[in-house]
Image (spheres, coloured by chain):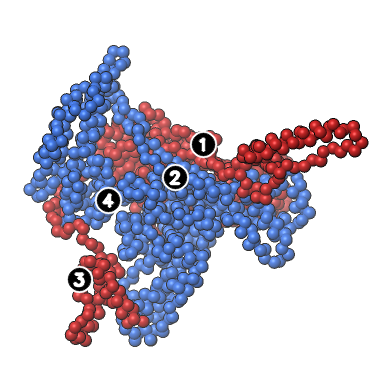
Chain colours: A blue, B red
């Protein structure tokens, strides 16, 4: 939980101009906000989030220069009409309901502001009151101010305040905020224009959640293992990690020690460390957790998860106390499809007997352990990934979605959800078509045909089937495509309406389905040829009805 | 008890909730039982009947989640009176039994179900989404597009406490329980250090509250959700007694009430003396209200402003589902289901017209020769444009998408607001003592050294030491870079060092 601003943490600072800045709050440094001034980081460390600070012109004797702007003050300014609490009647109307003041008299030209540019520049340099004086002066020197309606006056004042007030609000940097920042301030396409509503939908339809505190008993499999294909630079991984309670460094603070979490690593270690003195300090091995884990599958040799740095996890320089250090695993597509092509996986470093090892130099010994550990880690993660049984698959990728699902859906446990996000609809429409009713029927029929052709006891050659069908349409149901967009409103007394402008760009779509395990029973029944024919000649053949029901 | 919503086995266990999916939006919730607790007199024990056939629970229990289950032949018509059926069942002891029936001897043995020729369903593990589709409606339901967005904006994360009022049909209750879940209370691993996520649900309708409570028990969520029958306008959000009760210490609040502004007075940082605040004093409180009418939202916002809530914003969520279909148009589509028989190109239209004209002429000419003895009727021939393509049916036509036929164009106005922590003079003073306001030591653009760089530097240092020991006079070694400065120029030297290091290791 973000209870206060922690030293060293990244925070978001919202400026009066509604601009967002992501800043790491390093103690004893100065934070510069450009034309909105600067302040020392120590003045906000330890303070609560969502406070709005005003940078004062002078500091007090202790050097403190920030003033907290109270909520009342902020609201008074938003309402600005200044008419009490604005009980709905502040549209000034005459007797017959016509607004009294209108813009009829206003001349459309730029000469109403009597201050010249030079004068304003001078004001900016000299005026105090954190910009309030400038705004006041500007209002004063506006010749037509009394002609303005209450609304247009409010708009004018607000615009000027946004330009001159030296205020900022400190917000906790979480996934929602980061996503908005990337869309508004950065290249939105790099984060696939992922918006809040998509993040919520992905997480919910993907059924991503913390896996709890119960031990994995008999008949159970490790809980909460999610496979993620993420080409947004780590935004989707961050969003899912947030839902799983492993994103923030302080998520770990609240957790008890995680020793029971690493049996796999223990097993791997006991294989090769047989005998030699145990490492002095027990460091959590990377990627060693068995429950509540994210497995990222990436196309290049390293995953691009650079956005995780905002949450205190730098993939190049991982912090061992960060929960992602143990809970985030990564495999390349090659390791998943053909692990033996990867030397890291295939070439096991030879085991050096204990006696020999004891005679080695310190550096060589540590190099040996390093290599053994790395190999054991890669092997464990890859084997685990290839064994599958994942609890969910989240995809937001530049790859062809069908090729991802072809590989990944068979690796899911029954009833595990699949969610594919795409900024544009076309690829998902194609994907949905891969799972169309017609295709499923054709798949079932062809499969049955192939099985009938093959002689008994022999394995059925299904290669031609998989050639014709990119994905197996019988193991994912029901293919659903959806989109969502929120519409923001302005709510001010007497001035409530949807915002006039908004961001365009990609709409953002979600494909969703659930991994199912088709029964083999139909196939057994199909062994009785006569019966099968009989079924086929009825008006509602089995295959047809099967398909209708699941569409 | 664990919940199948949160942690589940690989197979469907008896006495837990299972969702039977018939088709996309048809999901039947059922509690799996190995015996018929309502004594409906089926030979097979408890049976769920659907429009796609009957499913005795003995065919469902023990199946892996996600399995396709074939319907069984169940005699639904001639069950007769329960009494006789029961007796009959007892007589059939020797028949095949299901696993559960063996355990309790009192129960009549059940007949093994026989699969039917058609009909099936998929047995799905419960999720809040599937539950939302299948739940028995008591009030207007908060659907997935809304609650997913709300929970995201409310920052409902593992370990949080969420207040929900009212519980209604329970869709938000389930979704928020999943969002905050990070462990079951009472298990040995739950330590005092770690705060367990919790949902405090309030419902003023007594009957609905009771139903929610029963549902939560059935779903194994009663440790995570505390459902209270309460009128929150009057009595606020404290747990137990409305005046002296314990604070839930909420981080997030969701109000799905007709008049949310009446409940807001109970959600302040400064409660009346003698009472605790319902909010978590250590964190900001996130609030969302859910009102269908604009007037409600406006009034809520006015009250929020008075009570110092910040970042007030209002949105509507518009979600739609898309149907994907192949649209097949062409003259060659006769007899293809769902296709439109219509020329697909100008060329095809022209060809058809020309062909028709020719054929008409042929018929006219032919008719003239009708009386002649060698009269032959015109042979039927398929025009070329009607010839079937060899593209498979499922890949024919153009791929299209359109919105589903029925849209939810308005659900409600969602109003979000944030209340920061309370902050006293003393708190501020403490902070100022710990972090002196004027202290500036480092510049904030100091480059950070990565682990790799540090290793390289250490390697360089070692190499340098070795060199010095050799006391070679004109050392070609680089000076020891004590901190990462200009990377580019040193890169090569460092690489050399690394190679050297590697060779020493090998």
Q: As drawn, is A63 to the left or to the right of B393?
A: left
| Letter of the chain that mark 2 sits on in the rendering | A
Element type where label 4 sits in the image: strand
Instruction: Of the two numbered discs 2 and 4 on the same chain, state the one appearing first in sequence.
Output: 4
Quarter location, residue B12? bottom right
State the residue position of label 4: A22
Q: Is residue B127 visible?
A: no
Element type where label 2 sits in the image: loop
Between the C-alphas of marks 4 and 3, the distance is 30 Å
Mark 2–mark 3 CB contact (< 8 Å)? no
State the residue position of label 2: A508
* Dot 2 and dot 4 within a common chain: yes
Between the C-alphas of marks 4 and 1, the distance is 45 Å
* Dot 4 and dot 3 within a common chain: no
State the residue position of label 3: B482
Of residues A344 and A108, the one nearer the viewer is A108
State the residue position of label 1: B137
* Dot 2 and dot 3 within a common chain: no
| Letter of the chain that mark 3 sits on in the rendering | B
* Residue B103 locus on image (x, y percent): 61, 56
Q: As drawn, is A165 to the left or to the right of A406?
A: left
Residue, x 19% and y 44% (percent of image)? A36
Camera-side mark, 1 or 3: 3
* Dot 1 and dot 2 within a common chain: no
């Amino acid at each position: 939980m973000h209870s206060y601003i922690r030293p060293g943490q990244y925070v978001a600072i919202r400026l009066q101009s509604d601009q967002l800045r992501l800043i790491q709050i390093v103690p004893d440094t100065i934070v510069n906000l450009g034309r909105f001034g600067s302040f020392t980081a120590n003045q906000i460390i330890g303070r609560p989030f969502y406070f709005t600070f005003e940078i004062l012109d002078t500091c007090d004797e202790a050097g403190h220069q920030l003033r907290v702007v109270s909520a009342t003050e902020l609201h008074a300014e938003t309402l600005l009409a200044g008419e009490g609490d604005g009980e709905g009647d502040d549209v000034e109307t005459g007797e017959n309901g016509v607004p009294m003041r209108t813009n009829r008299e206003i001349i459309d030209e730029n000469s109403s502001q009597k201050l010249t540019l030079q004068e304003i520049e001078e004001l900016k340099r000299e005026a105090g009151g954190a910009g309030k004086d400038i705004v006041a002066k500007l209002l004063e020197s506006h010749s037509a101010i009394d002609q303005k309606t209450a609304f247009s006056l409010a708009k004018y004042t607000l615009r000027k305040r946004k330009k001159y007030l030296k205020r900022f609000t400190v917000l906790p940097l979480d996934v929602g905020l980061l996503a908005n920042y990337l869309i508004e301030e950065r290249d939105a396409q790099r984060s696939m224009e992922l918006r809040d509503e998509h993040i919520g939908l992905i997480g919910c339809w993907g059924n991503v959640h913390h896996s709890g505190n119960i031990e994995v008993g008999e008949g159970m499999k490790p809980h909460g293992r999610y496979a993620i294909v993420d080409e947004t630079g780590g935004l989707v991984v961050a969003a899912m990690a947030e839902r799983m309670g492993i994103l923030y460094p302080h998520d770990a603070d609240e957790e008890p020690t995680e020793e029971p979490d690493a049996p796999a690593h223990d097993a791997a270690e006991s294989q090769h460390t047989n005998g030699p003195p145990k490492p002095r300090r027990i460091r959590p091995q990377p990627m060693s957790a068995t429950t509540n884990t994210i497995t990222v599958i990436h196309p290049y040799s390293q995953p691009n998860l650079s956005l995780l740095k905002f949450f205190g996890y730098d993939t190049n320089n991982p912090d061992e106390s960060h929960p992602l250090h143990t809970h985030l695993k990564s495999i390349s597509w090659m390791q998943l499809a053909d692990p033996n092509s990867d030397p890291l996986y295939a070439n096991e470093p030879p085991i050096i007997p204990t006696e020999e090892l004891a005679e080695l130099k310190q550096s060589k010994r540590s190099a040996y352990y390093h290599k053994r550990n790395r190999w054991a880690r890669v092997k464990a993660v890859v084997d685990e990934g290839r064994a599958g049984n994942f609890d969910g698959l989240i995809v937001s990728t530049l790859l062809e979605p069908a090729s991802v699902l072809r590989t990944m859906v068979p690796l899911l446990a029954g009833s595990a959800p699949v969610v594919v996000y795409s900024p544009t609809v076309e690829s998902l429409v194609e994907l949905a078509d891969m799972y169309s009713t017609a295709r499923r029927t054709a798949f079932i029929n062809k499969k049955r045909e192939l099985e009938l052709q093959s002689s008994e006891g022999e394995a059925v050659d299904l290669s031609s089937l998989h050639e014709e069908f990119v994905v197996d349409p019988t193991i994912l149901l029901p293919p659903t495509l959806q989109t969502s967009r929120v519409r923001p409103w302005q709510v001010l007394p007497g001035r409530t309406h949807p915002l006039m402008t908004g961001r365009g760009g990609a709409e953002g779509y979600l494909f969703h389905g659930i991994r199912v395990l088709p029964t083999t029973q139909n196939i057994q029944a199909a062994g009785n040829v006569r019966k099968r024919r009989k079924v086929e000649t009825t008006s509602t053949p089995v295959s047809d009805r099967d398909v209708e029901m699941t569409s | 008890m664990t919940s199948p919503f949160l942690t589940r086995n690989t197979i469907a266990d008896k006495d837990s909730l299972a969702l039977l999916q018939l088709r996309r939006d048809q999901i039947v919730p059922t509690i799996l039982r190995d015996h018929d607790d309502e004594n409906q007199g089926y030979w097979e024990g408890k049976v769920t009947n659907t429009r796609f056939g009957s499913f005795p629970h003995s065919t469902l229990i023990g199946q892996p989640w996600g399995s396709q289950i074939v319907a069984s032949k169940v005699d639904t018509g001639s069950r007769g009176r329960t009494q006789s059926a029961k007796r009959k069942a007892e007589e059939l002891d020797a028949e095949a039994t299901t696993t559960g029936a063996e355990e309790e001897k009192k129960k009549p043995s059940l007949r093994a179900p026989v699969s039917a020729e058609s009909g099936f369903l998929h047995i799905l593990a419960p999720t809040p989404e599937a539950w939302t589709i299948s739940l028995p409606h008591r009030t207007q339901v908060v659907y997935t597009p809304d609650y997913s967005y709300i929970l995201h904006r409310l920052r409902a994360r593992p370990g949080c406490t969420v207040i929900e009022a009212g519980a209604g049909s329970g869709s938000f209750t389930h979704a928020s329980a999943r969002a905050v879940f990070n462990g079951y209370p009472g298990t040995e691993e739950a330590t005092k250090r770690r705060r367990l996520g919790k949902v405090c649900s309030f419902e003023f309708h007594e009957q609905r509250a009771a139903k929610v409570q029963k549902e939560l028990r059935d779903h194994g969520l009663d440790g995570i959700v505390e459902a209270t029958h309460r009128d929150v306008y009057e009595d606020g959000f404290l747990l137990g007694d409305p005046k002296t009760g314990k604070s839930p210490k909420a981080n997030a609040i969701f109000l799905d009430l007709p008049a949310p502004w009446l409940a807001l007075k109970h959600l302040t940082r400064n409660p009346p003396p003698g009472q605790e605040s319902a909010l978590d004093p250590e964190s900001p409180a996130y609030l969302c209200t859910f009102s269908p009418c604009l007037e409600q939202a406006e009034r809520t916002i006015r009250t929020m402003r008075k009570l110092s809530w910040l970042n007030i914003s209002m949105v509507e969520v518009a979600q739609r589902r898309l149907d994907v279909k192949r649209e097949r148009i062409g003259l060659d589509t006769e007899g293809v289901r769902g296709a439109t028989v219509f020329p697909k190109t100008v060329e095809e239209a022209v060809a058809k017209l020309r062909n028709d004209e020719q054929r008409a002429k042929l018929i006219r000419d032919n008719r003239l020769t009708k009386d002649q003895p060698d009269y032959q009727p015109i042979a039927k021939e398929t025009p070329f444009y009607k010839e079937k393509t060899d593209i498979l049916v499922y890949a024919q036509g153009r791929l299209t998408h359109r919105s589903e036929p029925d849209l939810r164009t308005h659900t409600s106005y969602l109003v979000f607001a944030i209340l920061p922590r309370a902050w006293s003079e003393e708190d501020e003073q403490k902070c100022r003592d710990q972090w002196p306001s004027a202290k500036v030591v480092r510049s904030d653009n100091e480059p950070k050294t990565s682990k790799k760089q540090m290793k390289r530097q250490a390697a360089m240092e070692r190499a340098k030491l070795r060199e010095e020991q050799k006391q070679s006079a004109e050392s070609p070694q680089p000076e020891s870079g004590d901190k990462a400065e200009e990377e580019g120029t040193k890169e090569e030297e460092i690489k050399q060092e690394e190679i050297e290091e590697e060779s020493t290791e090998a």
